[in-house]
Amino acid sequence: MSTETPLRRDGEVRNPNEVITRSLLRLVAVPGLDRPAALVTLDNGLDHTKPNSFGPGGLASLDDALDRAFAANPAFIAVTGKPYIFCVGADVTGMPLITTREQALEIGRLGHRVYARLKESTVPTFAFVNGAAMGGGLELALHCHYRSVSGGAAALALPEVSLGLVPGWGGTQLLPNLIGIVNAAQVIIQNPLMQNRMLRPKQARELGIFDELFEPADFLERSLEWAAGVVRGDVTVERPEVDRSEMWDAVVGFARQQLDEKLHGGAAPAAYRALDLLLLAKTADFATGTAAEDEALADLVVSEELRSGLYAFDLVQRRAKRPAGAPSTGLARDVTKVGIVGAGLMAAQLALLFVRRLQVPVVLTDLDQERVDKGLAHLTGEIDKLVGKGRLDIGTAAKLHGLVSGSVDKSGFADADFVVEAVFEDLAVKKQVWAELEKIVGPECVLATNTSSLSVTAMAADLEHPERVVGFHFFNPVAVLPLLEIVRGERTDDATLATAFAVGRKLKKSSVLVKDAPAFVVNRLLTRFLGEIFAAVDAGTPPAVADSAVDPLGLPMRPLALLHLVGPAVAYHVGGTLHAAFPQRFGVSENLKRIAGSGQPLIVDDEVNPAVASLLKLGDAPLTAEQVRDRALSALAQEIRLMLDEGVVAEAQDIDLCMILGAGWPFHLGGITPYLDRSGVAEKVTGKRFLPKGVASLPA
Amino acid sequence: MPREVRDVVFVDGVRTPFGKAGGVYANTRADDLVIRCIRELLRRNPQLPPERVDEVAIAATTQIGDQGLTIGRTAALLAGLPKSVPGYAIDRMCAGAMTAVTTVASGIAMGAYDVAIAGGVEHMGRHPMGEGVDPNPRILAERLVDPSALVMGATAENLHDRFPGITKERADAFGLASQQRTAKAYANGKLQPDLVPVAVRDPEAGWGLSTVDEAPRDTSMAKLATLKTPFRPHGRVTAGNAAGLNDGATASLLAAEEVARELGLPVAMRLVSFGFVGVEPEVMGVGPIPSTEKALRLAGLTIDDIGLFELNEAFAVQVLAFLDHFGIADDDPRVNPWGGAIAVGHPLASSGVRLMTQLARQFAEHPEVRYGLTAMCVGIGMGGTVIWENPLWEDGK
C-alpha cells in the first residue's frame, strides 16, 4: 500500500512537517449484513505516545478514503482509531505556520467540508471512539450519525478554549443540538477553563455524546455488531429531546456572566466567541453555524492570545518535562529513605506527597512528641481519606501506613538519602537544623530546604558538606500546584542537583532550575506586582480601584484575593526579605503591615472585610486604574529583565513556566512575557522584547 | 465421606475463525483470541452469573510469551471474570483443549466444581511448532523414540508405510471430501454459529474483522496430485491431505447437569466416558484407535452404538487408519459431516473443543442419534477419545 496521500485542491495550506494521520479504508464483512461495511482506521503509523491528529494532509487522506468508501456502496461507514487513540484534534504544530487570516479560514473550511461528508451521507455513518478523542477528533465523531465509545478511552474533551481557540470543525453547532446547551457549555467552556478537565467515557455517555459504551476487551467487535443492528433496524438509538426553550439563551447569558467574573471582558476572546457560537447554534442552520465557526476560528488563529496559548501549551507539555539547565539524570543518587524536619501542616503535606510518590520510608521529626504525634495523625488520616475517596487502594494504603513514622529523636535520619526541612522561616533556625543533622546523616545525604525566600547559599555556609544543600520550593497547596523551584546554591554540586530533579520528577512536579536569589521566581514577581497595587492604595487609590485595575489581564484572581490566599503575614514576611535585598524596588507598605498585624481575614464573602478596610490609611494622591495597571506591568517587566540579567533562570520561557504552573497565570498571557511583549510594555520599560516575534506571538 | 459421581454436560462452545499462520491474525495476540471466546461464551449464556464459574482451564502447546503466564488465569482476568475465579494452563499438544475438557469434567463429576470453562489456543504464526523445545539427548542416545517421532509429517509418512492399503490417492480423496463438506456446511450456515468474530488490526491496512476460516480452499484431485511431499521425497503426505499451520482459539462451558438445569443453561451433550492412551511415538496417528477402544470399553458400548464421529484430521492417513480399523467407509456420512481440520485448520491445542462444539450442533439436528464421539491423535504418540450422549435422543426410535 502506498504511503503517499494525494493532496488535492487543499494543497496550498500544506504543512511540510505534518505527521500525516492516514485514513486506512478496509471493506469488512460483518455478520448479518449482505453488503460489507467500510471501516476507516485513523493511524499516523506511530505508537500511542504520538497520537493521531489532523492537518491538511490528514484531512486529504480522510477525504480520499471517503471517496473510496462511498464508491464501494457499503452497508455503513465507520471511523475508528489506532490502539488507545481515536484522534486528538487539529495538528497544532502546523498552526504557527499560518500567517494570514485567509489561510486560517481555509483550514476551518477544509475540516468542515471533509467532515460534512459524514454528516450528509445517505449511507449510515458511525464513529467507534476506541481511545482518546479531543478537539477535532471528537468533532469528527460528532459528524457521524451514531457513536460508540470504549470504556478504556482515556481522554475525551473539546479543549480548544483552553488554548485560545473554539471548536471550529462543527463542535459548537453539533454538540448543543445533541446534548443540550447546559451540557455543551460545560464541555466547551467550563471544562477547558478548569485545568482542562477531561470527560471519562461513562460521563460522556451519560451526557449523551455517545449512544453506546462498550468494554475495551471487545470494543470494536461489539461496535460493529451494534452498527449492523442499527442498519438492519433491529436496534433503535434513542436520544433525549433537546430543550430549545428560552432556557438556552438564559444558560448562555449565565455562562457569559461567569466568564466576566473570571476574564473581565476581553482578556481571552476565545471563550466569548465560543459562547456566541453556542447561542447561534440554537437557531442557525448548520451551514450558517459552521460559517460562523470559520470566521471565529480565522480571527482567533491570527490572534496574539492564541499564539501565546500555543507557546504556553508547548512550555507545559515539553519544557516542563525537560528542565533547562538540569544536570544529566545519570548523576542522580537513589533515594530510598526520606526525612522530614518539622511536623506542622506543611511538613505533613510534604510527607504525604513523598510517601505516596516515592513509596519509601518517610520519617517525621519535630521538637516534641505531641507535635510529632499530631503530624503523624494528620498524615495517616490523609491516607485514609484518599482510600475513602477511592483514590488509593487498600493495599497501597497499608504499604504507606507502614512506611511513615515519626520521632523526636533525629537518629532515625541516619540512613536517609534525602532530608527536607519545613521549619520556621528564619535563617538561624534553619542553619541550626542543618548543623545538627549533619552530625547524624551520611556525607552524601541531600539536604533540601523548602524555604520560600531565604538564601540557600547562606544556609549551607557553615556546613562541612555545603555541596549537598539545595532549595526545594513547593507551592501551596502542595498536592495541587505542579511547580517546584529547584534552587542551586553557590556550592550545590551536580549530583545533589540531579538528585533533586529526579525526586521532583518522581513527585510528579514540574521542576524549574532557579539561581539562589531572593524569593526565587514566583514569589519575587508576585511580591513586586502586589507591591505596586499596595503602593497605589498607600498613595490614596481606593482599594476597589487598585484591586480591579489589572482585570483586563484575566488573571485567576484579583490581587487582594491572592493576598488573602497566600496570607498577609506570609506576604509581609517575603516582602521584608525582598525589601532588604532590593530596597529601591520593593517597598514596605504600611497598609500591608496593618492588614497582617490585624490578624483578621482580608476577604469575607468575596468582598474586602470592612473591619480590615477601616484600618487602611490612604494618601492624597490617588491613581487611576490605568495608571495602576501601567505601573504594575512596568514593574513586572523591569523585574523580569533584572532577573534574566542576574541569571535567576535560563530564559524568559522559564519565568513564564513558573508563573503558569506556580501562580496559575493564564495561557492567553503566555504566562506573562508574551503579554508584556505584545502590549509594548517590555520595549518601553526595558528597551527590548523578551521573546523574538513569532515565538509566542504572530510572526513579524 | 460417601459421594456420588455427578453427570457432566457440555453447555456451549465457541471458537474464533481459524486463520492461516502469518495470515489474518499476524498482528493479533494469542491470548486475545481465547479471551474473545471466553467473553462470547459468557455473553451467549447470560443466565450464568460469572462468579459461578469455578475454574478456567486453557490449553496451549507452546506456553511462552502470549501463550504463557498461566494462560487460564490471565485470560480469565482479562476476559473480565471476577478475580475470585481461578484458572490454569494445560498442555497435551493437539489434545490440549480436549484434555482441558476432560480434566474440568472430572472435577465437576467429583463435586469440586459446578461450572467450568475449558478451551485452548494456538497461534502457530507467533509460536511455530517446536519453538524453544529442548529434547533430552537420551531420546536419541538410548533410541527411546525414533527421531522421526518429533516431526508430525514424518509420523504420517510412517503410518502410510504401516498401512500400505492407505494410498496417496485415498488420502487425497479424503482431503478433497473434507474441503467439499466444509464448503457445503458453510453454504448451509452450519459452521457460522460457532464462530466469534475477531477484530484484527493490520498496521498498513487498518482494522478489519475476521468472520470466516481462512484456510478452506477450492481444489480438485488433479490439483492435489501436483502438491509437494515435504516430509519425504516421493512420499504421500502433502498440504492437501493434512491440516495446515493455523492460528485460533476455542472455549466451552461445562457444568454439572443438575447445576445447568438449576441455572437454566442449555444441555447440549452429556459426557459418557473418555480415554487417553499412548502408542509408539513414530506412528502417533494410530493413537485414536486404542483410545476409542478404551473409551468404548469404559462406557460399555461398541463402535456400532456411535451415530456421529468428529475426528480431528491432523492427517488424512491417520483418520483413514481409524476408519479401516473400525470397518467404516471413507465417505461414511456419520464421520465429519461438515468436513474437518484439513479444510478449516488445526490450531493445535484449540482443536478438541471445535470437535465437541460441532458434535453438539449435529446432536441438535439428529435426535435419532444417541451417542457421538470426538477423537484425535496427539504428538509423542497418544490418542484421546471422548464419548458423548445426545440429551435430545428420543428413546424407542
Image: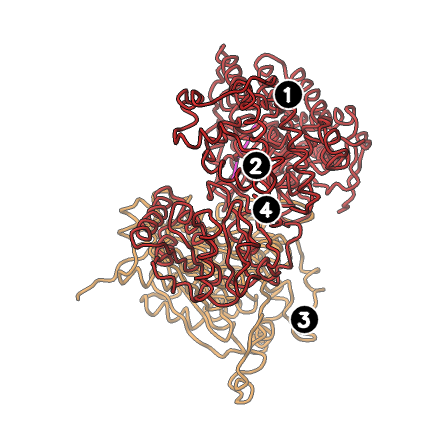
Indicate the amino acid at tag 4.
Pro
N-terminal of the pair, mark 2 or mark 4, is: 4
User: Quarter-wise, where is residue A112 in the image?
Assistant: top right
Few, some or many residues within 10 Å of mark 3 (<14, 14–19, 20+): some
Report, in whole angstroms, how far the alpha carbon at label 1 lies from the one at label 2: 56 Å
Secondary structure mostly taken by the magenta-highlighted segment of the chain? strand
Upstream in the sequence, badge 4 or badge 1?
4
Residue A652 at what x, y percent from top left?
68, 41
Start-end of magenta stretch: A146-150
Viewer-side label of 2, 4: 4
Disc 1 is placed on an element classified as helix
Mark 1 is surrounded, within 10 Å at the Cα level, by few (under 14), some (14 to 19) or many (20 or more) other residues, namely some
Give the residue at mark 4: A83
Supply the letter of whichever chain is orange. B
Q: Residue furthest bottom?
A: B142
- Judged by depth in the image, the label closer to the viewer, 1 or 3, is 1
Within 10 Å of disc 4 (Cα), the crowding (few <14, some 14-19, many 20+) is some
Residue placed under numbered mark 2 in the picture: A128
What is the x, y in percent for residue A305? 67, 28
User: Can marks 2 and 4 be said to lie on one chain?
Assistant: yes
Q: Mark 3–mark 2 contact, CB under 8 Å?
A: no
Amino acid bearing label 1: Gln
Check the rendered structure and report the hue given to chain A: red
